[in-house]
Amino acid sequence: MKTNIIYKFLLSFCFFMITALSISAQSKLNLSLDDAIHMAMQNNITYNLKKTETQVAKQKIISTQMANIPDIYGTSNLQNNLIVASTPVPAKMFNPNAADNEITPMKFGTNWTANMGINMQYDIFNPEKYNDTKKSKINLQIANVAEEIERINLASLVSIDYGTSLIAKQQILLASDDTSRMHALYSYMKAKHEEGKSTIEDLNQSLIDVNNAKARWIEADNVYKKSIATLLNDMGIVASAKTIEDTKLTNDLDELLKQAQNNDLSDNKLALVNKKSELQIQSIETELQSVQLKYLPTLSVSGFYGTNFFGNKLNLTDSNRWFGNSFIAVGIKIPISNALHTDSETKINRLNVEKARMELKNNMLLHDFNIVQYKQDMESKRESFSIKQENIRLANESYEANAQSFKEGRLLHADLQKSHYAVIQAETDYLQAIYDYFQAWINYKKSLAL
């Protein structure tokens, strides 16, 4: 019996541990750069607003197409005439002896009236609505381009965030190596001091160097956590202390740098910003056509099919009081004074078209200029990165040689410190060069697409 209880307890404990480990594993966010971009597309509010705007533009096309269907609706009205209106009529209609200019009032209405029926209204030609569907289709294309621009901007932003986080992670590794190095030197100086071969000043300076190395590690860790928080925020994920802690980047810095160095980028002749400008010109030109059409008349048809009730007493069930009523009418509305306003609108829209064309030309020039500048900047940063990468190797090599000379008694501690500071400066320059190069590469990629 006791064995069964122990056995059940062990099974329950194992199940609990497996469940806890499973939940813990699921809470970890292992992110590649592609994963980060994909999640940003799903969660980023700004990008999803653009997607919603595209959906709205699609619905507007359907709405404008539905406007071409005749407007059919039912009406019903019940009216109590408190005072039945009188109409003057010639008195001779009822009294042949009446004078020619004599009139007599006559009531043509009843105390109660009602009507019900089906109405129809349809514009055969309405100049103000003629281009609505065309304008809606152009606006949908503009919305699609705007969504794609936002997608590229978001992908670029997340890429920079991801690269910045990897650089911060590299900074932590360098700070950890430096802290270990300073600890080792402090241990050596402490042993020398105990042997009476080193001054207390040198020993304390070694400890200061250890503390400074620790402080750099703490700052590097803080920078890393902030960069992860920025990445998560741009991905549309809450950047809490837990999510920051649980986020692990699966790409390494070398992968991204290799991708930047080997990626063959070519100019996109159909730049999205220019395409958007061209569509905006089409939209303005269509608006200009719509304005010019306002000089034309509106032709419409309307109709009614129903019945009317007349009676001095309210009795809607009395079929003798209901009388059929039906008509169909064709109307034409010719603009006269409104033509003056239309003329002003036409001039404004022509100026807007001219303005949009100049803006497009300027955008194309700026696009080509930016590509040249970003490409030159990227190549310059790549060369600078290679030099800084070599400098960090040389600085570390010099420090190791000087550390050996110091241990052999051929170098002062102050000179070894200078060598150490050179390593720190080389590491700082190296990390900055990586960031500058990576950002320049992203900017160049972005300029080709936009």
Image: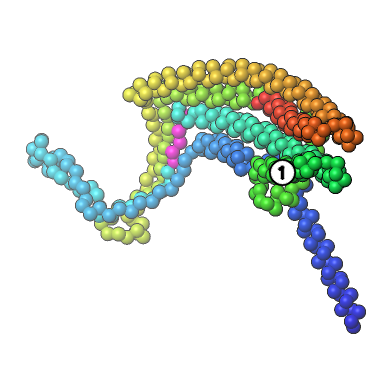
Q: Nearer the viewer, residue 195 or 121?
A: 195
Q: Name the residue under label 1.
A: 215
- Give the image location of residue 445, x and y in percent: 71, 27
For the view shown, which residue lies furthest in the front direction?
A: 196
The residue under label 1 is which amino acid type?
Ala
Q: In which quarter of the image is the C terminus?
A: top right
Horizontal side of 92 relative to 9 (left or right) equals: left
Q: What element does badge 1 sit on?
A: helix
- Give the image location of residue 400, x and y in percent: 87, 33
Q: Is residue 346 magenta?
A: no
Is 110 located above or below residue 46 in the figure?
below
Horizontal side of 383 relative to 339 (left or right) equals: right
Tell me what residue is drawn at x 88 percent, y 76 percent: 6
Q: Which of 133 and 344 is in front in this view?
A: 344
Q: Is the magenta stretch mostly helix, strand or loop?
A: strand
Q: Nearer the viewer, residue 95 or 175?
A: 175
Is 402 located above or below residue 169 in the figure?
above
Tell me what residue is drawn at x 54 percent, y 16 percent: 358
Q: Nearer the viewer, residue 19 or 449?
A: 19
- Give the image location of residue 17, x and y in percent: 82, 64
Badge 1, how many Cα within 10 Å: few under 14, some, many 20+?
Answer: some
- Give the image location of residue 343, x and y in percent: 39, 20
For the view shown, which residue lies furthest in the bottom direction?
A: 1
Can residue 375 be seen in the rendering of this structure? no
Q: Which residues make up the magenta segment?
A: 120-125
Horizontal side of 7 relative to 316 (left or right) equals: right
Tell me what residue is drawn at x 60 percent, y 26 percent: 276
